[in-house]
Amino acid sequence: MEITSKSAEKTPEGHLIPHNIIDSNNDCNLCSILLNGEDILFYDYVENFREKISYIIEYYKNIVNNFYVITYGEVYSDIHGFKLEILKEIFIKKGIYNRFFVRTSSNINNFNCNFQTSLFWLGKDIDKIKSPTSTNIKTHFLSLCRKVDYHREFIFYFLKNNGLLKKSSYSFSANNKNHIDYKSIEGDELSWDKSNNHTKLLKEYNECFLNINTESIFNSKINFLTEKTNKCFLTAQPFIMVSSPHTLKYLHELGFKTFDKWWDESYDLEEDNEKRLEKICELILKISKFSIKKCKLIYDDMIPILKYNQNNLIYLNKNQIDNTFYIHQTHYFNNKKKLI
């Protein structure tokens, strides 16, 4: 069985991977491992997959430092998740499980592994960055919800029951017109065949003081950032993060600054999901009592941080992997030296 490799300086979509990312991985080069000239596919038959991947791991375990599966998308699908279980089993059996990593920008559901978040969304569309200004602020909150999840529903009905929708620009269940509280300000339904909707910047971002950012993942230990957070940075909009615990901490680790100078962000430390929601709602209620004039004054005071965050976003765009690696197309492994 012949093993060859090819340079992976571009993603499958043709986007360049910055060399400093390749070189920063312990002075390694990122290479695609091939068997008999064909990419190893996750759609291969199970036994073929097991045989091929076992051979590769054995061949490279004394050559490479670490093995990475880099992907965007729901990892733990019926097909992908089962194959990841096989990978995990092989690495454990060979006694090198500590060198196996799954790096993804999406939720890995209940798959227990050495997980690393990749920054698929952060740093996209930096050509759309808007300069911070309080001029157009005319209401308190922006709250956008297409897909109804527990934490999003909780926040929406908190706003509704406390009369705060009148202080908000909002959508709710925007992909489901049959919902009793359906409202959409986004326009078209969100779908991958209308992927521009993921990056569309509504005028409301600049008309609302604060984004109640209900991220995709809430009840999880994973810090999962999507286009929702990226848009806050692009539009220089302050936010409250309705997400997993320690998400603000994760943003700080990525170089961003948040807003503890102006309000209490200790909700981010609360690991009990119900209590975290309660703390977030207390904060929303407190901010709702600000006058619009006060909101504008606070925003003006925030401008240095909002600009700083935009510059950090540009930095991430230039210094992080820029686009999608699809797990079912190509596997990339972190190699110590070029193999060709």
Image (cartoon, rainbow, N blue to C red):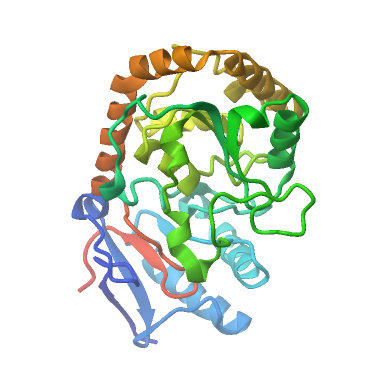
Between 199 and 217, the one nearer to me in the picture: 199
Residue 76, compared with residue 114, is above or below; it is below
Residue 338 image point, x, y percent: 21, 66
Marks counted in the figure total: 0
Residue in view at x 34 percent, y 59 percent: 64
Residue 82 image point, x, y percent: 65, 68
Viewed as shown, does residue 17 lie left or right of 232? left
Viewed as shown, does residue 221 lie left or right of 64? right
Residue 336 image point, x, y percent: 27, 58
Q: Is residue 327 visible?
A: no
Quarter occupied by residue 196: bottom left
Residue in view at x 47 percent, y 56 percent: 198
Residue in view at x 34 percent, y 87 percent: 37
Residue 117, compared with residue 240, is above or below; it is below
Residue in view at x 45 percent, y 19 percent: 259
Between 123 and 93, the one nearer to me in the picture: 123
Where's the N terminus, which quadrant?
Answer: bottom left
Quarter occupied by residue 219: top right
Where's the C terminus, which quadrant?
Answer: bottom left
Residue 70 image point, x, y percent: 44, 60
Residue 207, compared with residue 334, is above or below; it is above
Viewed as shown, does residue 230 lie left or right of 45? left
Quarter occupied by residue 277: top right
Residue 293, compared with residue 61, is above or below; it is above
Between 141 and 250, the one nearer to me in the picture: 141
Q: Is residue 303 visible?
A: yes
